[in-house]
Image (cartoon, helix red, strand yellow):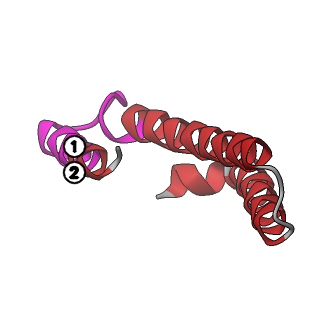
Amino acid sequence: MGHVSANRTKLRARVRRIAGQIAALERAIDADADCAAVLQQAAAARGALGGLVEALILDHLEHHVAAPGLDEDARRRGADELIAILGRYK
């Protein structure tokens, strides 16, 4: 998946920020932080992860479904991969 490596720096930065949010969430739980604060941190982490997934989905669509020059079989494979992934993403 060469297009992922083309965006590696940005994707890794996003993953690191998400990892930091998850670590902060764990620390908040360990510190018996206020319930609302823990929920807010969890919601922020979920939103950040959702943003990452959205970016990856759009990238997949661009490179494996809608890219000029793809034959019909390649488009179908790209679409089928995305359909399978979206079936697990809820």
Question: What residue is rendered at 28% in x and 52% in y?
Answer: 88
Quarter placement of the C terminus: top left
The answer to if 79 sits in the magenta stretch is: yes
User: Where is 50 relative to 62, above or below?
Assistant: below
Question: What residue is rendered at 34% in x and 27% in y?
Answer: 68
User: Where is 25 relative to 38, above or below?
Assistant: below
The answer to if 13 sits in the magenta stretch is: no
Image coordinates for residue 55, horizontal then vertical, percent: 55, 37
Image coordinates for residue 21, horizontal then vertical, percent: 78, 54
User: Where is 9 relative to 37, above or below?
Assistant: below
Magenta residue span: 63-82
Farthest bottom residue?
A: 30
Q: Which residue is mark 1?
A: 83
Name the kind of residue labelled 1 in the image.
Ile
Query: From mark 1 to mark 2, how far is it between C-alphas?
Result: 4 Å
Is residue 6 shown left or right of residue 68?
A: right
Circle 1: is it few (<14), some (14-19), or many (20+) Cα within 10 Å?
A: few
Circle 2: is it few (<14), some (14-19), or many (20+) Cα within 10 Å?
A: few
The disc label shown at residue 84, or none: 2
- In terms of image quadrants, where is residue 46? top right
Tell me whether circle 1 and circle 2 mark residues in contact (CB < 8 Å).
yes
Asked whether 11 or 39 is in front, the reply is 39
- In terms of image quadrants, where is residue 64? top left
Question: What residue is rendered at 64% in x and 41% in y?
Answer: 43
Is residue 1 shown left or right of residue 50?
A: left
SS majority, magenta? helix
Secondary structure found at label 1: helix
Secondary structure found at label 2: helix
Image coordinates for residue 41, horizontal then vertical, percent: 74, 46
Name the kind of residue labelled 2 in the image.
Ala
